[in-house]
Image (cartoon, helix red, strand yellow):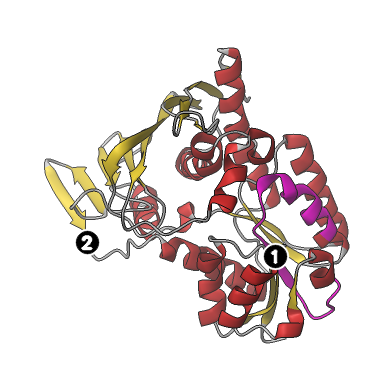
Amino acid sequence: MDQLRVGIIGTGRISDLHALEYLENPRARIAAVCDNNLDIAQERGRRWGVPENRIYTDYHDLLALPDIDLVDILLPHHLHYQATLDAAAAGKHISLQKPMALTVAQADDMITAANKAGVIFRVFENFIFYPPVQQAKALVDAGEIGELLTIRIKSNSGTSATAWEVPASAQAWRFDYAKNGGGPLVFDDGHHKFALAWHFMGMAEQVHAWIGQTEIAPGTGMFLDSPAIVSWKFANNRYGSLEVVNSPEMAINTIYYAQDDRVELTGTKGVIWITRGHGNMLDVPPVILYRDNQMRTFTNVPSDWKYSFMNATRHFIDSYFKGETPRLTGEQGREVLRFTLAAQESAHTGQTVRLS
């Protein structure tokens, strides 16, 4: 087989970014799509060159296609569990949007089902494939700032006249904690930040969190999990923190979500800053290194957020054809989920949560 034939389950806003590499990579093609909203499924399917008779509203019909090799599952979080079990039972390789599940027990069942079926199961996490993050990781691995001591992540959300449009129906489930699993900023988008901490520092030993709640508008009953502070203790006397703040009157330069991120990595010899994520709040190079009384900047680093998706998908396609294990594996996704759920538990109980 010279092409990976992909079925996309869930064709909402984020599917536009997931589709990019499949459309450009000659070793893959989108062969079927499914969404419970037929109009949306047809619009995406036609744009991606999918035949009309391979556009569905029931993902079981897509899973029944014998020529689909991989399904890219882009459903609300509470639907991940059953869709993954069904895809594994159908013998399809699985790329599942983060976070993989609502509980660790669900994650365990999903991993077991994929292993039993003999299919590849990867949890899609694009931030570790974001070019500025890849540049920073290469610098860390090369010893440029010595041994890592701390990681500090700041996530700002606000407003933007240039952000992409997300339909209200697609947003509603993110404010339903029973469906989302936590909240839209610390649990949902926060998965990216927990994955970054895991990527650079490994698994945390302890987590302590304060997670506030702010109603997005009076009387809506829709709350952002902000402001929030999450603190991490890692092995070997290393630490980290995540600060999440929504500033409703702050305009953010972005073409994606009205949000931006910064990361600061401090080592025994220096500091690395990753200066952007979803957007472009700071008019500075995407990666900055300070060491030996000198500052080095890295300007020739693609910093459009879309490249994190394209790189993550290309990595999966490469891994598939090379017979290698892609990141995040189901087991790695479970680690990041534990990390993320620990913050929710700590905020609820007011106690530090120990993970090891």
- Side (left or right) of 95 relative to 249: right
Looking at the image, tell me whether mark 2 or mark 1 is earlier in sequence order: 1
Mark 2 to mark 1 CA distance (whole Å) = 40 Å
Query: What number is the disc on residue 299?
Result: 2
Amino acid type at circle 1 is Asp
Element at label 1: loop
- Position of residue 154 relative to residue 123, above or below, is above
- Position of residue 353 relative to residue 63, above or below, is above
Residue most extreme to the front: 219
| Image quadrant where residue 247 sits | top left
Which residue is more in the foreground, 331 or 248?
A: 248
Residue displayed at 39% across by 51% down:
137
Q: Quadrant of the C terminus?
A: top right
Which residues are drawn in magenta?
64-86
Q: Quadrant of the N terminus?
A: bottom right
Residue 234: give x, y in percent of width and height: 49, 28
Is 13 one of the magenta-colored residues?
no
Residue most extreme to the left: 293
Which residue has dot 1 on it? 35
Which residue is more in the foreground, 248 or 140?
A: 248
Residue displayed at 71% across by 84% down:
52
